[in-house]
Amino acid sequence: MPPLLDFKDIQEKLSTQFRPWQRSFQFWVRAADIYTGYKVFQLRVSLVKDEEKQEAMWEGQHELAAEKIYAMCSDLGGFFLKVAQIIGKPDLAPAAWVRRLVTLYDRAPATPFDAVKLVLEKELGRSIEDIFERFDVEPLGSASIAQVHRARLKGDKSDVVVKVQHPGVQDLMMTDIHNLQAFALYMQKTDIKFDLFSVTKEMEKQIGYEFDFTREANAMERIRQFLYKNNKTSPVLVPRVLKDMVSRRAFVMEYMDGIPILNLGDEIAKRGINPGGKIAAAAKQNILKSLTLAYGQMILKSGFFHADPHPGNILICKDYGQVKDLPDKLRLGYANLVLAIADGDPIRAAESYRELGIDTLSKCENEMQELFRLAQTMFDTKLPPGVAMLQPFSEDSSIKKISVETFPEELYSVLRTVHLLRGLSVGLGINYSCAEQWRPIAEQALYLAGRLKDTDLKTKRRGRSFFRRLL
């Protein structure tokens, strides 16, 4: 007698096979709706002469688009949650987008506990009951690639955090990235004169790395040791990884208590301190200073840095899935650009762009000044006086006047880090320049590489022995 067909099994296999096609269809339908909505609106608003009425119309359009973008990112999940993190920044996107998209940080749909248990026991080689005295079924948070649970090991008095990868998410994320690359190619040929495709290629490479938690755990330890080595007191705290509990899809680290950085104002108010007062401002300034110092040291001294400092990742501990090892040529080229921005030197900025392999095409008369403005827009956290949002793709922006024809893929992580730091500073209500804070570190990197002489230094205490003491 022939075996009976298992229709449920066939249905599941067909569903798995066609799921990437379904996601692609959903993405293109929704992306086209949002894009054409803005194009049609631009025609409508151009017929209105009253500026106040125009602003009200734009706000309404942004609200409408924000709901559609939120729905797309929330429904599709996966990589589109990372897209929400990138575009939902208060210094870059319309306020309506930010208000809606910020709620997606660490709020990806959680994997059911039964599936989590299967992954964890397969990866660690033992049952949960054998390893943990307590394991919270409800996750502390769930993001695009993994979710984290609070637990306590048997025979221990301290809590730990267990990070577990969502099963089956990698193939779907790769499908999402390829769709975004095609959309980026279209956008850079029509609306945005920037090499978006190279940026998405680097995103594809970095996302691929994130699925290897052994790499993430090693990165955490490397960064933790680097920061402790280079500072009397580390400017940020990095969780310690339990080395005997690390695998490709799960690992265990020490638990660190904290609050999301953008909830800092609420926490300050709970303690009876005026969130808009001097004490609160000083606290926020110190937090940003510590965070920026850590990133300046990582990028400019070693070239190995955590490349995903979005608000959902920052309590005191951070997610180290996205790390970048920057080649010395790019590290020193970027150090040169930091000096150019900090010193207000357009000629040096143009030289740095050429050294970094950023090819531009000018569409204006004052090319040097616009190129310098572009460098500030892309690689510094400071907003110009009176500006609350950069709007880099508006008609009078530098990106419209200076077309970025080629952008090195490996430099994308630096660009993203700077923009996320700027988003944090805007969210905290503090306008500061990372280039100015990083200036001594950049000068040190160039000096030790033999590209600056004692007479070139602006740091008060000159000499190789001084810089060696900084290392």
Image: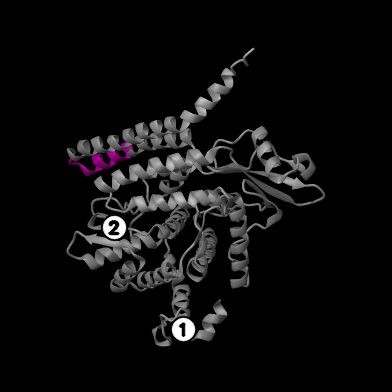
Q: The residue under label 1 is which amino acid type?
A: Lys
Q: Residue at x 23, y 60 (%)?
A: 361
Residue bounds of the magenta highlight: 49-61
Disc 2 on helix, strand or loop?
strand
Q: For label 2, count other residues whose C-alpha is less than 10 Å away and answer few (under 14), some (14-19) or many (20+).
A: many
Q: Residue at x 69, y 41 (%)?
A: 122
Disc 1 on helix, strand or loop?
loop
Q: Position of residue 46 (x, y in %)?
A: 19, 40
Q: The residue under label 2 is which amino acid type?
A: Val
Q: In the figure, 405 relative to 17: above or below? A: below
Q: Quadrant of residue 178?
A: top left
Q: Which quadrant: the C terminus?
A: bottom right
Magenta stretch mostly in which secondary structure?
helix
Say left or right for 284 vs 376: right
- Choose the circle earlier in sequence order: 2 or 1: 2
> How far is disc 2 from disc 1 in space, using C-alphas?
37 Å
- Residue ID for mark 2: 404
Say left or right for 274 vs 46: right
Check residue 460 in the rendering and tell me which mark sits there, or answer none.
1
Check residue 324 in the rendering and tell me which mark sits there, or answer none.
none
- Between 46 and 277, the one lying in front of the other is 46
Q: Position of residue 329 (x, y in %)?
A: 42, 70
Q: Which quadrant: the N terminus?
A: top right
Q: In the figure, 319 relative to 347: above or below? A: above
Q: Position of residue 237 (x, y in %)?
A: 62, 60
